[in-house]
Image (spheres, grey):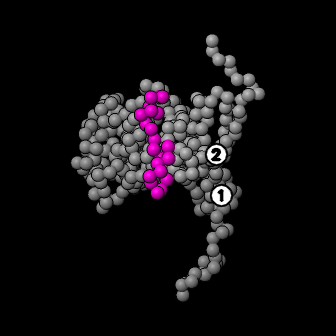
């Protein structure tokens, strides 16, 4: 007979608090111009540490889209070449042997696609036409063909189907919400009176708040997906005592034996990446038996702790409080700007 569920009085309740910094980039720059399916494909390429080139006519769009794409790697970090806007005089960096995220003006599309290393290794994200393709397939007009070919032949592994569907549903929902808001702040008129200036300030604040909400919700969804796949990974970590600096030994084979079969191939490929090694090393400490620092306020650590308790401890119940740390506004920093005259001689003062 099944074991009885624990009584309410025997449940160990715990409350964890996490702080999430408001992002300094716009997710709308990516969500407005790239379909969720193609955004997930680009994320898979970056997780497998491949080369990605972003094309757009607008430099600010390239900068925001590159930052948004990099944020889709959460809880991992991009440690390779990252150039949101690459000028033509530096196109030689596209021959870099390591992975990269590079943004290039769409005006140089033909030049970029003619570079051999880009043709053979890079994924092209065309924000002007909502396309994701390899340079060798640039002549193919049908989107399903390149997507199917790239996903099954060019990648070592892709998201497990349940995780892919969960992320697709989340990003599609955010994609629909992002289209309700303008892609840029309202334009100003030098002749506007103070009342109009106040109205524009309110509109700009509302736009920034909506962007922050979208980015935080997406980060939470990514964190939950990875917490589900990596739940309990701390139980398979041990301190590496032979190193002077703190190190972590992760028993990947034993951990994979505890995972659902549809997750194994994807996780096996992830464990081979430098991003996962960096993920462990940033949490390393010599003060604990497993070599990992205790769970404090990191968003992923808190989500993973809650998921692990759900799986391994039926008597545990964790509630999570999420606090968003707002980014500073320039208008709030203005009073703190120095007005004293500079130290250089014969230089005018900034004082009014």
Q: Which residue is farthest right? A: 9
Which quadrant, please, contains the C terminus? Answer: bottom right
- Residue at x-position 25% and y-position 43%: 120
Judge left or right: residue 106 versus residue 318. Answer: left
Q: Is residue 232 visible?
A: yes
- Residue at x-position 63% and y-position 15%: 2
- The residue identified by callout 2 is 18
Q: Which residue is farthest front? A: 242
Indicate whether 104 appears above or below 234.
below
- Residue at x-position 68% and y-position 20%: 5
Q: Is residue 37 visible?
A: no
The range drawn in magenta is: 238-259
- The residue identified by callout 1 is 197
* Residue 195 is inside the magenta segment: no
Q: Which mark is residue 263?
A: none
Which quadrant, please, contains the N terminus? Answer: top right
Q: Count all numbered tags in the image, as a single digit.
A: 2
Q: Residues within 10 Å of mark 1 (few under 14, many from 20)?
A: some
Q: Residue 289 appears at what percent x and percent y?
A: 55, 45
Disc 1 to disc 2, how far (Cα)?
36 Å
Q: Residue 35 appears at what percent x and percent y?
A: 44, 36
- Residue at x-position 28% and y-position 47%: 118
């Amino acid at each position: 007979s099944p074991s009885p569920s624990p009584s309410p009085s025997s449940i160990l309740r715990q409350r964890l608090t996490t702080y999430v910094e408001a992002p300094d980039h716009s997710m709308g720059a990516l969500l407005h111009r790239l379909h969720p399916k193609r955004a997930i494909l680009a994320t898979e390429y970056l997780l497998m540490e491949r080369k990605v080139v972003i094309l757009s006519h607008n430099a600010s769009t390239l900068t925001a889209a590159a930052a948004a794409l990099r944020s889709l790697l959460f809880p991992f970090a991009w440690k390779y070449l990252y150039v949101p806007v690459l000028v033509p005089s530096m196109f030689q960096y596209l021959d870099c042997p390591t992975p990269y995220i590079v943004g290039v003006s769409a005006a140089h599309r033909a030049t970029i696609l003619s570079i051999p290393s880009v043709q053979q290794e890079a994924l092209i994200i065309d924000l002007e036409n909502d396309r994701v393709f390899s340079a060798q397939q640039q002549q193919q007009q049908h989107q399903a063909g390149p997507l199917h070919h790239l996903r099954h032949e060019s990648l070592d592994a892709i998201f497990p189907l349940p995780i892919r569907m969960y992320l697709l549903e989340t990003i599609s929902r955010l994609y629909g919400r992002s289209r309700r808001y303008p892609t840029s702040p309202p334009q100003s008129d030098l002749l506007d009176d103070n009342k109009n200036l106040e109205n524009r300030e309110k509109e700009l604040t509302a736009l920034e708040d909506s962007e922050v909400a979208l980015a935080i919700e997406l980060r939470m969804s990514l964190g939950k997906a990875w917490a589900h796949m990596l739940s309990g990974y701390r139980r398979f970590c041990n301190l590496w005592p032979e190193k002077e600096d703190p190190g972590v030994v992760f028993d990947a084979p034993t951990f994979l034996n505890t995972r659902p079969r549809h997750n194994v191939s994807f996780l096996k490929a992830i464990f081979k990446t430098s991003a996962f090694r960096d993920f462990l090393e940033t949490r390393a400490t010599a003060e604990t038996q497993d070599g990992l620092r205790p769970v404090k306020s990191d968003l992923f650590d808190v989500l993973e702790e809650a998921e692990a308790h759900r799986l391994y401890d039926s008597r545990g119940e964790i509630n999570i409080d999420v606090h968003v740390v707002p980014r500073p506004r320039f208008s709030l920093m203005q009073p703190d700007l120095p007005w004293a005259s500079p130290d250089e001689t014969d230089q005018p003062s900034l004082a009014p």
